[in-house]
Amino acid sequence: MSKLIREGDYILLYLDRRRTYLVRVEEGKNFHTHKGFIQLDGLLGKEYGTRIKSNLNVEFVALKPILRDFIIKALRKTQIMYPKDIALTIIFSGIGPGSLVVEAGTGTGALTMALAHFVKPNGHVYSYEVRAEFLEVAKKNLKRLGLLDFVKLKNKDVTEGIDEQNVDAVILDLATPWLVVPHAYKALKPSGNLVSFSPTIDQVLKTTEALKENNFVDVKTFECLLREMRVERGKTRPQTLMTGHTGYITCARKTLK
């Protein structure tokens, strides 16, 4: 992986902890901010982590974006899953390089990007979404991160069935996950994992009942709360504001009948 910034690379321009910008570096292109504009071609051939000043003499840092940055800065038409929930979903799904994964619904692709990142280079994600306009945005987000080759976007209703067989995991982020549980059972390998993200406890209850009725075990539900710390000598304490409840994550494993 190159340590130098090249034509067409994405960088994360860091001003401070609240103001960052995901930008594609192109020759002759300027990036305008309220702190002045930055000549992006001045970064070509420089190392990531380089400091650069705007025409108003305000200093930015050109960082190499990580997966979290692409997710947070994703083009969106819908609410996306938070990185904290995506991280737990990945862990509970048990996926890794070479895994085959069914996802529904795609939305604008935040979770899809993370799944594709972890199954490459030999795995694949089959992502179901009923709204074609969302898939177009997801396609752009995946292409920006170079992950489109590892995903098949499907404009289909997953509650009507899953085409794939013998997959390692089924991951759901939709309004009625319990309707997908019987289809997920047929699609999964023995001992395969199902993970479902739902914002309300009523959805969790219906999904849990469906999982137990369809020969899944190790059925558990979690809520992940994340609070950043303010770290400053003599003033260190939790931040006043935090990302509280976003949703519940339910996971389960398929057994043989």
Image (cartoon, rainbow, N blue to C red):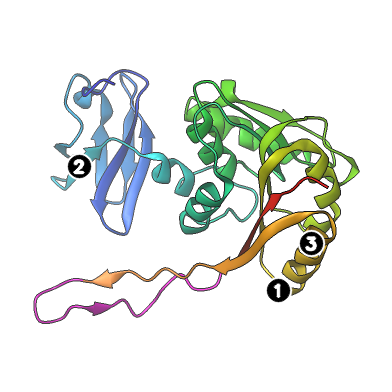
Q: Which residues are magenta?
A: 231-246
Q: Indicate which disc, 1 or 3, sits on the residue closer to the N terminus.
A: 1
Say what amino acid the circle numbered 2 marks: Val
Q: Residue furthest left?
A: 233
- Give residue 240's position: percent from left, percent from top: 34, 80
Which quadrant: the N terminus?
top left
State the residue position of label 2.
61
CB within 8 Å, label 1 to label 3: no
Question: Of helix, strand and loop, which one carries label 3?
Answer: helix
Label 1 crowd (10 A; few <14 / some 14-19 / many >=20)? few
- Give residue 144's position: percent from left, percent from top: 49, 29
Q: Quadrant of residue 28?
A: top left
Say what amino acid the circle numbered 1 marks: Ile
Label 3 crowd (10 A; few <14 / some 14-19 / many >=20)? some
Q: Residue furthest front?
A: 257
- Give residue 33's position: percent from left, percent from top: 32, 46
* Residue situated in front as seen by the camera: 51 or 192: 192
Discs 1/2, front: 1
State the residue position of label 3.
212
Q: Quadrant of residue 150?
A: top right
Discs 1/3, front: 3
Q: Is residue 176 visible?
A: no
State the residue position of label 1.
201
Say what amino acid the circle numbered 3 marks: Lys
Q: Is residue 234 magenta?
A: yes
CB within 8 Å, label 1 to label 2: no
- Give residue 37's position: percent from left, percent from top: 27, 39
